[in-house]
Image: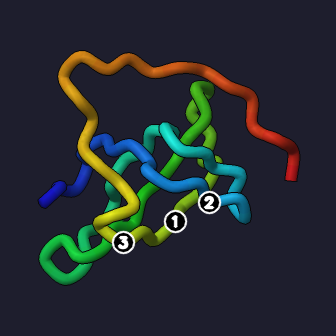
């Protein structure tokens, strides 16, 4: 189970929010002992891009040897 403030990686795209597989977010709330998570995704400038409720199968913990990668989000 992931914990609040833990960084996670998106395993599925969320087109309605402009999110793609591999985007990194931060858990801001844990629902029902880890069945779902509220995850905030931010730009590298620190602005909130999206806050999404995701099922546990839709995110995974960040790996120890992973690095972030920058991409520009499409305008909404």
For discs 2 and 1, the disc positioned in front in the rendered view: 2
Q: Residues within 10 Å of mark 3 (few under 14, many from 20)?
A: few
Q: Which residue is mark 3?
A: 55
Q: Does residue 35 appear left or right of residue 17 in this picture?
A: left
Secondary element under disc 3, as helix, strand or loop, is: strand
* Residue furthest bottom in the image: 32
Residue 72 percent coordinates (x, y): 74, 29
Q: CA distance from mark 3 to mark 1?
A: 10 Å
Residue 8 percent coordinates (x, y): 33, 44
Which residue is at a point 13% across and 76% down the rendered structure image? 33
For discs 3 and 1, the disc positioned in front in the rendered view: 3
> Are discs 3 and 1 less than 8 Å apart at CB?
no
Q: Which residue is mark 2?
A: 14
Q: Which residue is mark 1?
A: 52
Secondary element under disc 1, as helix, strand or loop, is: strand
Sequence order check, earlier mark of 2 and 1: 2
Residue 18 position (above or below residue 34): above
Which residue is at a point 33% across and 67% down the rendered structure image? 37
Residue 64 position (above or below residue 52): above
Secondary element under disc 2, as helix, strand or loop, is: loop
Residue 23 percent coordinates (x, y): 51, 39
> Are discs 2 and 1 less than 8 Å apart at CB?
yes
Residue 60 percent coordinates (x, y): 29, 49
Residue 63 position (above or below residue 5): above
Q: CA distance from mark 3 to mark 2?
A: 12 Å
Q: Residues within 10 Å of mark 1 (few under 14, many from 20)?
A: some
Res. 59 image quadrant: bottom left
Q: Residues within 10 Å of mark 2 (few under 14, many from 20)?
A: some
Q: CA distance from mark 2 to mark 1?
A: 9 Å
């Amino acid at each position: 189970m992931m914990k609040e403030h833990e960084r996670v990686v998106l395993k599925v795209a969320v087109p309605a929010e402009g999110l793609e597989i591999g985007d990194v977010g931060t858990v801001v709330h844990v629902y029902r002992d880890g069945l779902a998570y509220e995850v905030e995704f931010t730009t590298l400038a620190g602005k909130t891009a999206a806050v999404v409720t995701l099922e546990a199968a839709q995110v995974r913990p960040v790996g120890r040897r992973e690095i972030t990668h920058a991409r520009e989000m499409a305008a909404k």
